[in-house]
Amino acid sequence: MTVLVNPTALSDHKARDFKMLIDGRWETGAADPIERVAPSHGVVVSRFPTGSRNDAERAIAAARKAFDQGPWPRMTASERSAILLKAADLIAARAEELAFLDAIEAGKPITQVRGEIAGSVDIWRYAAALARDLHGESYNTLGDGTLGVVLREAIGVVSIITPWNFPFLIVGQKLPFALAAGCTAVVKPSELTSGSTLVLGEILQQAGVPDGVVNIVTGTGPEVGAIMTSHPDVDMVSFTGSTGVGKLTMSNAAQTLKKVSLELGGKNPQIVFPDADLDAFVDAAVFGAYFNAGECCNAGSRLILHKSIASDVVSRIAELSKAVKVGDPLDPSTQVGAIITPQHLEKISGYVTGARSSGARVAHGGKTLDLGMGQFMSPTILEAVTPDMAVAREEVFGPVLSVLTFETSAEAISIANSIDYGLSAGVWSRDFDTCLTIGRSVRAGTVWMNTFMDGASELPFGGYKQSGLGRELGRHAVEDYTETKTLNMHIGKRTGWWMPQTEKPA
């Protein structure tokens, strides 16, 4: 089902001219701005400064000074927590503005983005709570006269680089935890979807974050991102994006041995056994494959179905897929919005063409959609997919579902683990032993059992293998932005190291 794009929906929208934030000042940049064309309506909706190498260096210098000399790392935990809570309240107050920006810049359904902003508010509040619960350890069991204390200290200046698919949500999975730990930051949002992150800069100023603590530089990866990942004054890099760029980020950071947190790609399997609740699964499969137009690292894009149920399940998924509403992101009924760029739409279509050439069959969709303007892809199901096909191994990042089959549990596990990614997985069975056995055998950072893509601020998120390093969300998130320091203290008179005091020469 399609929702035609309303050609007049943005007729009254004036393209917004944004500035970037460096050391508390809003700047335009020296070069011509980056114009963002709405992927759904084909009109310019935002203009972002084209940040330069010099802009990135000045932002890093500001963050370095704010960490080394400024008040933020030296505040009490309760003071930082109060500011983060105020930021959360201000985000909630500007939720509709933030949702609109992400919808028009990324082509995301407005109803979905409203949910993402609400989720972000919860994450900011959770990070504020963790700020007051970050603590070390003490050991008084090391012998008479010895006390050991283990401290958690803010790691320093953090470069945060975020992608275009969840502009506001993903910066919220990084920045509040870095701030809770006492770090300072330089943030680079995607040059395609920078608007909501720049509004966040305004919010943080209003909340009382001191100048230089959060800097936001817009621009491209080769110009701005390269400096942010290699500069010696940066202590840590937190990056979300493709595995290829993640490897480049890690290589740049290795020049000065920075700590790196990477949340990268996924090709996430859902393994379904004959005794599963198929009504629930079919609904979850459609959501997991097409949510955010499939432009989601967590998408359940690989179905591994038991052969005895495969034909029936594919038919049911195809039937439900017909009811999915694709189209205008600003229509509240839309479930699948626009594809981010024409080039990316071509890439998705190329995967479908390649799969068909390799022997896969299109059970549903498989075509680009003409909705009068913008770029859209029909929800697509490919069956007769084999584990060696590119569409079964590589991240398509579009609304494309690949269906594979298995006969034994061992075969299902082998197929699930046969690729380079290990971000998440799903297991569907009414038998708890089956779910637990598969869940422990699949190499993935998150395994859902009889559900898919549920999450919470308290639960850590991240991947195995080439899906990344480190974890976001949960207690692990704030700890990731710290260094561990050991204080070994002696109390009273020492007896000496090599010899007692009485044996030392006069």
Image (cartoon, rainbow, N blue to C red):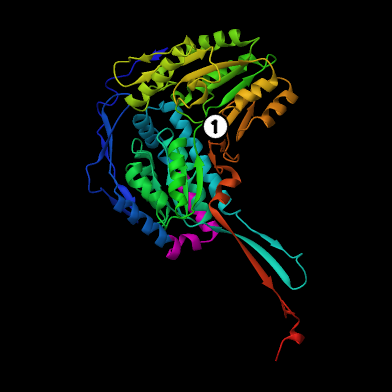
| Residue 274 seen by the camera | yes
Looking at the rendered structure, the secondary structure element under dot 1 is strand
Q: Pick the residue in front: 48 or 77.
A: 48
Task: Name above or below for residue 470 compared with residue 353.
Answer: below
Q: How far from the left and from the top, in percent, is residue 396?
A: 45, 25
The reply, left or right, for residue 241 in relation to residue 30 is: right
Q: Pick the residue in front: 20 or 401.
A: 401
Q: Give me the residue at 53% from left, 12% from top.
A: 383
83 in the magenta segment: yes
User: Which quarter of the picture shows residue 5?
Assistant: top left
Q: Amino acid at mark 1?
A: Tyr
| Residue 202 seen by the camera | no
The reply, left or right, for residue 144 in relation to residue 480 is: right
Q: How far from the left and from the top, in percent, is residue 330?
A: 36, 24
Q: Residue furthest bottom?
A: 506
Q: Give me the residue at 36% from left, 42% from top.
A: 221
Q: Pick the residue in front: 151 or 388.
A: 388
The reply, left or right, for residue 496 in relation to residue 253 is: right
Which corner quadrant holds the N terminus?
top left
Count of numbered circles on the image: 1
User: Which quarter of the picture shows residue 501?
Assistant: bottom right
Q: How far from the left and from the top, in percent, is residue 35?
A: 26, 35
Q: Which residues are magenta?
A: 67-89
Q: How far from the left and from the top, in percent, is residue 276?
A: 67, 17
269 in the magenta segment: no
What residue is pinned by disc 1?
421
Task: Name above or below for residue 484 compared with residue 159.
Answer: below
User: Which quarter of the picture shows residue 147?
Assistant: bottom right
Which corner quadrant holds the C terminus?
bottom right
Q: Residues within 10 Å of mark 1 (few under 14, many from 20)?
A: many
Q: Pick the residue in front: 491 or 222.
A: 222
